[in-house]
Image (spheres, rainbow, N blue to C red):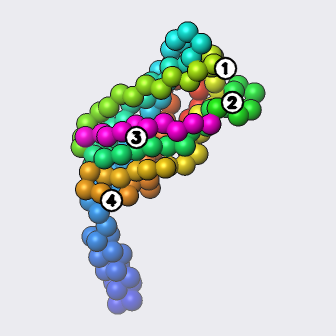
Amino acid sequence: MKHTLKILSVIILSGACAPVWAAETTQIELNSTTQSGDACRLTFTANAPFGLAALETQTVLFDTQGAVSTFTLFDFGEVPQNGLRVRQFDVPGTQCGDIGLILFNGVERCSTSDGASCEHALTFASRVDAIEVQQ
């Protein structure tokens, strides 16, 4: 029994040392798509409970047959603490109906307002039925 209490104490104490924002995540959501001439305009929302100074992602678009069609960087910029930001990215030479998957392949930059790294506290989702989002 004493051994179990020591382990529990270590678990509780180690959790107390974690940053406050570690349990909270920034959600990046594909909110909508709009055809704008020969470009597909992707509209994302970013909600950051702990605030972001910078967020830039390696982003890969796949067509509906699963082939890579575009590899690019999306710079979401700054997101205020407990704030919501909307960002739009035009993907030239792309029909929105041809996109089947958006893969957030990696995070180039992610830092909180106080300078801490935050790539472990990101989640990605899609509100657009026809386009899946993965990380």
Check disc 4 and report the residue beneath it.
Answer: 116
The part of the chain drawn in magenta is 71-80
Q: Are marks 4 and 3 in contact (CB under 8 Å)?
A: no
Q: Which mark is residue 98?
A: 1
Q: Secondary structure at mark 2?
A: strand
User: In front of the other: label 3 or label 1?
Assistant: 1
Check disc 2 and report the residue beneath it.
Answer: 69
Give the CA distance from mark 4 to mark 3: 17 Å
- Is residue 115 something one can see in this rendering? yes
Q: Are marks 2 and 1 in contact (CB under 8 Å)?
A: yes
Say what amino acid the circle numbered 3 marks: Gln
Task: Residue 64: give x, y in percent of width and height.
Answer: 70, 25
Q: Secondary structure at mark 4?
A: loop
Give the CA distance from mark 2 to mark 1: 9 Å
State which quadrant residue 91 falls in.
top right
Looking at marks 2 and 1 on the same chain, the residue that comes earlier in the sequence is marked by: 2
Quadrant of image for the N terminus: bottom left
State which quadrant residue 20 falls in.
bottom left
> Dot 3, crowdedness within 10 Å: few (<14), some or many (≥20)?
some
Check disc 3 and report the residue beneath it.
Answer: 27
Say what amino acid the circle numbered 4 marks: Ala
Give the CA distance from mark 3 to mark 1: 25 Å
Give the CA distance from mark 3 to mark 2: 25 Å
Give the residue at x 35% y 52%. Answer: 111
